[in-house]
Image: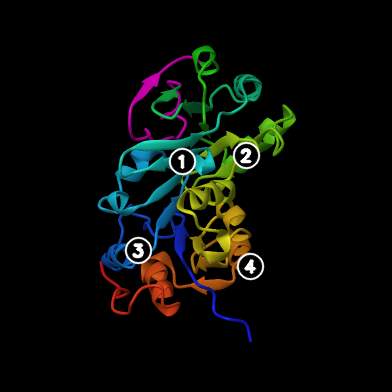
Amino acid sequence: MSEPVRIRAVATDLDGTIVRPDGTVSEATREAVRKLREAEIPLIVATARTPAGLSAIEPLGRQVDLAVCCNGSLGYRPSDSAVLWRYEIDPAVLKTVITALRGYLPDAGFGVYDGQEWTLTRLYRAAGGSWPRGPRRLAGPGQIAQVKACAMSVCHSRLGPAQIAAVLARAGIGSRQALLSWAADGVLNVAPAGVSKGTGVTRALAHLGIVGAETICFGDAHNDLPMFSRVAVAVAVANAHQDVLAAADVVADSVGNDGFARTLEKFGIIRPGSARQSS
């Protein structure tokens, strides 16, 4: 009989997994995070959000040990605002994406993030995107193409992320050129090729001297799948996409029913009493 896995780290997606649809975090989740700190078990979050987007989730942002931001292209330590790594989208790929959008979808809105500031087209909000948190400026497509970007967001008032990705495929942009992932708000996220939440979590764990075989992770969307094959226990919350549920080792309660906290208790990672459901 195999010995139980010793869990030394917890990695989790944010939105839809521990952050509820209204952007809040339950008291049970906050208490679970506090208990992880008491037990000296590091918490890594893996998200499409930027550091500014993470800090907006109060008080969770201050409790995170390491953050894998921008779907893996930026590593961040909240305690001292240190950037641990940063990968850039290939400039040629960025220019090709922008050229394709201007040619095939002239009414699309898009913007890029350089690790500190967003540069956005004037159409971004009109096309359905919400202003990202943190510093931002408006610029034309030509200026945006010159930015050393670690992340890009594209939106359209009538087309969803999959349809936008199909347009980019006509220009030759696929998984070998960039990581394309869908955001819950209907935005297509673009990250450097070869970068994912999985590569980011592995790198974050290395900073902590921990390996994936000692880690449990939580997710709900396709961009969480790269984490699942790199950890000992992969957990999908009940509200996850069907493909994520199928790939998980464990299916937990939904984000609304505090699946994160309840699962940590079930595995004995935190002591009981933290997973009460609360508003």
Query: Could you tell me which secondary element the residue under label 2 belongs to?
Result: strand
Q: Main secondary structure of the magenta part?
A: loop
Report the colour scheme.
Answer: rainbow
Q: Report the label total.
A: 4
- Figure check: 244 above or below 121: below
Place of residue 257 in the rendered image (x, y in percent of width and height, measured from the top left): 37, 71
Between marks 2 and 1, how big is the CA–CA gap? 17 Å
The residue beneath circle 1 is 75
The residue beneath circle 3 is 40
Query: Could you tell me which secondary element the residue under label 3 belongs to?
Result: loop
Q: Nearer the viewer, mark 2 or mark 1?
A: 1
Q: Earlier in the sequence, mark 3 or mark 4?
A: 3
- Figure check: 68 above or below 142: below
Q: Residue at x 58, y 41 (%)?
A: 161
The residue beneath circle 2 is 179
Q: Which residues are magenta?
A: 121-140
Q: Nearer the viewer, residue 143 or 30?
A: 30
**Label 3 crowd bin: few (<14), some (14–19), many (20+), radius 10 Å:** few
Q: Earlier in the sequence, mark 2 or mark 1?
A: 1
The residue beneath circle 4 is 246
Q: Quadrant of the N terminus?
A: bottom right
Q: Nearer the viewer, mark 3 or mark 1?
A: 3
Q: Earlier in the sequence, mark 4 or mark 2?
A: 2
189 on left or right of 59: right
Between marks 4 and 2, how big is the CA–CA gap? 22 Å
Question: Does 211 lie within the magenta span?
Answer: no
